[in-house]
């Protein structure tokens, strides 16, 4: 039975609920509802004007209702009188097809009918910067190879430990925190889980990190490439498919190459086959392509892929197989939608399983130094426009994610690209003013 939110409010001394949804651009929206009204809201949902968020609606559309999922309840560790709830979107009594959480649940249901259950974990990299967003928050964080720097990590102990303590309180199973490859960049890891659970936690983690950073007079950003000379923010996804009970890992096969089953390689084949179109979902901003195929950073490596290749335990490829029974997709960045990310992974992987796609030969080389020697390896899109065009051409992927979601995403993101294209940059003036 789902939680009784009215009873939970009384039991946990929750005074307000944030009924929340994430739109197609990955922006979290919410209404603050007093606990005295949660009974009706739990049944009918909180009302929103859909046009006011990125969901491809018009002012003429009916009211949109966000119906909270009681099982998603998270009591804000830094403000325990408030409870956060992930919600599913409805309009005129029907699901809003392009709602990202609705989209993920639809893909999950399709997979479960075939006996499959996606589990994943995410590595959410972010920078701690000044409140105005112009510079790193730690002026002493200047090493050319700052990854794992203990001093820089501990100078941000108050922020990092508060976020980690919050995850421990929530029962997420956080197990490590580190200073990442860029100055001012951090990563915090917690246990993997079922796709919807991880997606809700991913969405909440971004909100939590930003909120706690603000408490300390700082700003947390998941922007893919906020500083041109530093490594960008990835959001690597560790993926495995289990049986519908969630007890047997169907990717695991001790006799398989690198401990991965034939089904696992078919799934990998689907990711490889749809990689160009997946870029639109996993690298959804203009800025995303400053991270992909980027020149070498001050640390010596970008840690991001440029080609559609895979390998064993090798971080220079788009996909690596670090251990038996799982794979790491290194394509997604910090702007990836927490719900569309696993939805698109499962959609592409299922297609690979259904069509028994072969991922081809793995290349156990340093792709940064020797990538030019790989014959026939496709390159990832160089910009958002190319990625959107690739996604638009990928009929199987669009159908698997959902035509409504795909159409709305393409329309809004194409408008995003056109808006960027109309922007006049300082570089253009510097290079062509006297042409």
Image (cartoon, rainbow, N blue to C red):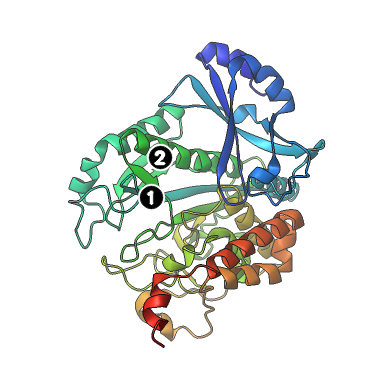
Q: Is residue 26 left or right of residue 328?
A: right
Q: Are marks 2 and 1 in contact (CB under 8 Å)?
A: yes
Mark 1 residue crowding within 10 angstroms, few (<14) / some (14–19) / many (20+): many
Q: Position of residue 7 (x, y in %)?
A: 61, 13
Q: Nearer the viewer, residue 226 or 255?
A: 226
Q: Mark 1 points at which residue?
A: 126
Residue 1 visible in the picture: no
Residue 72 position by quadrant: top right
Q: Is residue 69 left or right of residue 18?
A: right
Above or below 94: residue 302: below
Residue drawn at (55%, 69%), measured in percent from left and top?
Answer: 422
Q: Name the residue under label 2.
A: 209
Q: In this view, does 164 lie to the left or right of 324?
A: left
Q: In which quarter of the image is the N terminus?
A: top right
Q: Where is residue 298 in the image (x, y as percent from the top left)?
A: 26, 67
Residue drawn at (37%, 40%), measured in percent from left and top?
Answer: 175
Q: What element carries label 1?
A: strand
Residue drawn at (75%, 54%), measured in percent from left and top?
Answer: 404
């Amino acid at each position: 039975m789902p939680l009784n939110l009215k009873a939970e409010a009384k039991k946990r001394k929750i005074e307000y609920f944030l009924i929340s949804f994430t739109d197609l651009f990955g922006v979290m929206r919410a209404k603050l509802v007093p606990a005295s009204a949660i009974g009706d809201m739990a049944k009918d949902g909180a009302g929103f004007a859909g046009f006011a968020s990125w969901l491809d609606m018009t002012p003429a559309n009916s009211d949109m209702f966000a119906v909270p999922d009681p099982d998603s309840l998270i009591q804000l560790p830094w403000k325990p009188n408030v409870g956060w709830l992930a919600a599913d979107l409805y309009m005129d009594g029907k699901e809003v097809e392009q709602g990202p959480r609705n989209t993920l649940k639809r893909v999950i249901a399709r997979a479960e009918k075939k006996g499959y259950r996606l589990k994943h974990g995410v590595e959410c990299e972010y920078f701690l910067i000044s409140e105005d967003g112009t510079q790193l928050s730690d002026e002493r964080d200047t090493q050319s190879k700052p990854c794992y720097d203990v001093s820089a990590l501990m100078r941000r102990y108050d922020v990092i430990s508060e976020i980690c303590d919050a995850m421990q309180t929530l029962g997420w199973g956080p197990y490590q925190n580190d200073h990442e490859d860029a100055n001012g960049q951090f990563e915090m890891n917690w246990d993997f889980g079922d796709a919807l659970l991880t997606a809700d936690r991913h969405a909440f983690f971004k909100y939590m990190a930003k909120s706690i950073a603000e408490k300390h007079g700082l700003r947390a950003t998941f922007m893919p490439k906020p500083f041109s000379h530093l490594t960008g923010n990835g959001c690597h996804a560790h993926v495995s498919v289990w049986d519908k009970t969630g007890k047997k890992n169907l990717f695991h096969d001790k006799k398989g190459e690198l401990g991965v089953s034939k089904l696992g390689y078919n799934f990998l084949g689907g990711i490889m086959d749809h990689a160009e179109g997946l870029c639109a979902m996993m690298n959804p901003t203009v800025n995303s392509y400053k991270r992909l195929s980027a020149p070498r950073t001050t640390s010596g490596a970008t840690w991001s892929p440029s080609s559609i290749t895979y390998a064993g335990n090798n971080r220079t490829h788009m996909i690596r197989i670090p251990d038996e029974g799982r794979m790491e997709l290194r394509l997604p960045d910090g702007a990836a939608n927490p719900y569309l990310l696993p939805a698109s992974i499962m959609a592409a992987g299922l297609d690979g399983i259904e069509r028994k796609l072969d991922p081809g030969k793995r290349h156990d080389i340093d792709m940064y130094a020797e990538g030019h020697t790989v014959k026939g390896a496709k390159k990832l899109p160089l910009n958002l426009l190319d990625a959107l065009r690739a996604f638009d051409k990928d009929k199987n992927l669009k159908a698997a994610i959902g035509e409504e979601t795909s159409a709305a995403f393409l329309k809004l993101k194409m408008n995003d690209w056109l808006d960027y294209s109309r922007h006049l940059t300082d570089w253009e003036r510097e290079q062509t003013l006297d042409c």
